[in-house]
Amino acid sequence: DAVESAPAIVIGSGYGGAVAALRLGQAGIRTLVLEMGRLWNTPGPDGKVFCSTAAPDQRSMWFRTRTEAPLATFLWLDVVNKDISPYPGVLDRVHYDNMSVYVGRGVGGGSLVNGGMAVTPLPSYFAEQFPTVDTAEMYGTYFPRARSMLGVNTVDPSWFESTEWYRFTRISRKHATNTGLKTTFVPSVYDFAHMQREAAGTATKSALAQEVIYGNNHGKRSLDKTYLAAALGTGNVTIHTLERARSISRAPDGTYILTVDRIDNTGSVVETKEYGCTYLFLGGGSVGTTELLVRARETGTLPALDASVGAGWGTNGNVMLGRANHLWDTVGENQSTMPVMGIDDWANAANPVFAEIAPLPTGLEHWVSLYLAITKNPSRASFSYDSGTGAVRLGWSAAQSAVSVSMAKKLFDRINAANATIYRYDLFGSSNKVFADDFTYHPLGGCVLGKATDNYGRVKGYSRLYVTDGSLVPGSIGVNPFVTITALAERTMARVLVEDTAP
Ligand code: FDA
């Protein structure tokens, strides 16, 4: 039973994992990244690496026989989801009671499937969520570092005003303006110069070809093209794919021992490996990291973990909804999949909401204005371990989702009243479901900074064990989260490499 060992291991290759890998590699520390998903670099029979939302196949979802898209139906018809064969596809939907969590699977984690919106939170709200973090240092150093590494850019306003691909956004903006609400452009990691070439017909279409939640073949600066490419470029970083960390324990000499299942394309475990390391960085995402640590504490492999591991989890107040437009307010059959604008009512202390104007690209005029609302829902839930089944459960209730819905409803009731419009009833499965409140794109928390860890992501109770991902964020950040997750990971790595790894 040979144990493969590396000075540092990083679990997961999303934002938190990718930042850790790059900074370790640059510091000259040999680092192994374990990622349960695939490396997405090989074209399928159609010549493309990823499939589109219009024609999902096995590449779309993580070991499913049918896709589980966020929009269940359209005009009440079950036309959205398709039968597929089980395969390590790029998007997963992790089911818990009353809440399911969408996550990316593959080298790059959520960056492979997300909408690319690269938003920096308001300093005042960041300070409220992270009272122990130096806000000036975050906004002076780590947010700019994260944005520059991620390749954040903004849409050219004059192109935005003229292109058919953002008509849907301009219609939603008009309705917000009619209501007296403020809208704001949202930066992105999708290369807008590429998108303009797509529109001009001089580049292969991706955002303009219904590609997003099952991956983008072009244009998107996902982590495999930014942080992870740079990490591999240091020569000190190796990535193992289709390897899922199952458990973590500690040897008497203080090194960490990981039990890891290697799977094949059918999901069968073809090998169970053991790895050893001195430094262990957890970047499995809010759900992946928290599950590993809750299980480690409750099964006694890391018994000294703090009682707050597993607590402080939230959905970032996510609610999706659609409005039905008047016949003259066409949203266009051509829609870019990359959102570029939000309705910013966060300053409304009585009901803070930041609502992304989301596309619904079907190739047909459908008169739907779709939104992903981020609400200031204070509800938090905890994970618990079921010793009977070995499962980790999430204690989220329908009543907690109802809090997000009532906040979104207050805002969109105003927009409907001002524009004499109604909600769409045909999008989320049952005949009168207007608000999709049973899933989140923004799982946050579970190993909250300053509670389960110290002020820099060092896990309490153990030395040389770190959390660098979305589980550090205490349940809400008020905007789309990946820029914050990246900046916090940069802050952790800057501190750890100076203080913890000195020879
Ligand atoms: P992340 O989830 O990115 O990465 C974790 C990685 O670890 C995954 O690759 C996973 O496979 C792997 N892993 C987990 N457990 C493991 C184990 N035990 N062993 C090995 N590997 C393991 N945010 C935003 O800011 N703007 C946006 O536009 C969007 N849009 C959006 C759309 C959709 C469809 C989704 C699903 C999500 C978004 N998000 C978003 C959210 C954003 O993608 C998310 O917040 C980040 O990806 C979270 O980064 P983390 O580093 O926490 O984990």
Image (spheres, grey):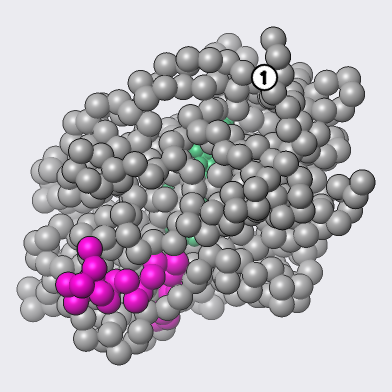
Residue sitting at x 80%, y 45%: 458
Q: Quadrant of the N terminus?
A: top right
Q: Nearer the viewer, residue 452 or 429?
A: 452
Q: Is 184 left, or right, of 77 in this rendering?
A: right
Chain part drawn in magenta: 183-204
Q: Is 139 left, or right, of 265 in this rendering?
A: right
Q: Which residue lies furthest to the bottom in this view?
A: 158
Residue occupied by mark 1: 274
Q: Position of residue 255 (x, y in %)?
A: 82, 28
Q: Nearer the viewer, residue 285 or 99?
A: 285
Residue 266 placement: quadrant: top left
Q: Where is residue 34 in the image (x, y as percent from the top left)?
A: 59, 34
Q: Residue furthest front?
A: 235
Q: Where is residue 310 in the image (x, y as percent from the top left)?
A: 66, 36
Residue sitting at x 64%, y 44%: 237
Q: What residue type is labelled 1?
A: Glu
As for residue 346 lying within the magenta part, the answer is no
The local crowd at label 1, few if under 14, some if 14 to 19, many if 20 or more residues have their Cα within 10 Å, is some
The answer to whether any part of residue 411 appears in the image is no
Residue sitting at x 77%, y 28%: 256
Q: Which of 456 and 331 is in front in this view?
A: 456
Q: Is 225 left, or right, of 414 in this rendering?
A: right
Number of numbered markers: 1
As for residue 189 lying within the magenta part, the answer is yes
